Image: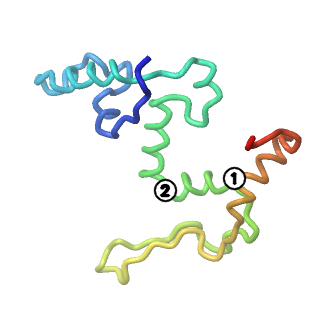
Amino acid sequence: MRPLRLLRCSELEVMGLPEERGRSGGGSGVREEAGARSRARSWSPPPEVSRSAHVPSLQRYRELHRRSLEEPREFWGDIAKEFYWKTPCPGPFLQYNFDVTKGKIFIEWMKGATTNICYNVLDRIVYEKKLGDKVAFYW
């Protein structure tokens, strides 16, 4: 059995979605050839794993990525709703300026909001999924 390996982003882009595979990438054939090599080295999870995954497919990942670029306030606002906030964001969720002609360059995410990372990534999950009686780690 070959060991699992991480794919670079460039390899994922070359692989494309199933419906994109086999299309010409400008007539050079480079995309198809590189895609075939990458697919031969890639692994797809069983359907039951994909169904229960937070991001079940490469297509869904691309949709989320596109939305994060086109609608960052809404995208990250929806992500933030999945977490516990001790102090919710009192003002705009996201503010930024990348245009020097409009003033100082800055970015502010959830300014004034506070949370507890340990609670969000461990305690809340243990409580919500009723895992308190389960062994988390054997020594």
Q: Position of residue 114 (x, y in %)?
A: 69, 71
Q: Position of residue 126 (x, y in %)?
A: 80, 46
Which one is in front, 76 or 118?
118
Q: Earlier in the sequence, mark 1 or mark 2?
A: 2
Q: How busy is the neighbourhood of tag 1: few (under 14 within 10 Å), some, or many (20 plus)?
A: few
The CA span between labels 1 and 2 is 23 Å
**Quadrant where the C terminus lies?**
top right
Q: Is residue 18 above or below residue 115?
A: above
Q: Is residue 61 above or below residue 45?
A: below
Q: Which color scheme does this rendered protein use?
A: rainbow
Which one is in front, 76 or 138?
138
Name the residue that disc number 1 marks. Answer: 121
The residue under the point 75% across, 41% down is 138
Q: Tell whether 73 sits left or right of 2.
A: right
The three-letter code of the residue at mark 2 reads Pro
The three-letter code of the residue at mark 1 reads Val
Q: How busy is the neighbourhood of tag 2: few (under 14 within 10 Å), some, or many (20 plus)?
A: some
Please tell me the numbered disc located at residue 72.
Answer: 2
Which one is in front, 119 or 5?
5
Q: Position of residue 102 (x, y in %)?
A: 34, 80
Q: Tell whether 113 sits left or right of 107.
A: right
Location of residue 47 (image quadrant): top right
Please tell me the numbered disc located at residue 36.
Answer: none
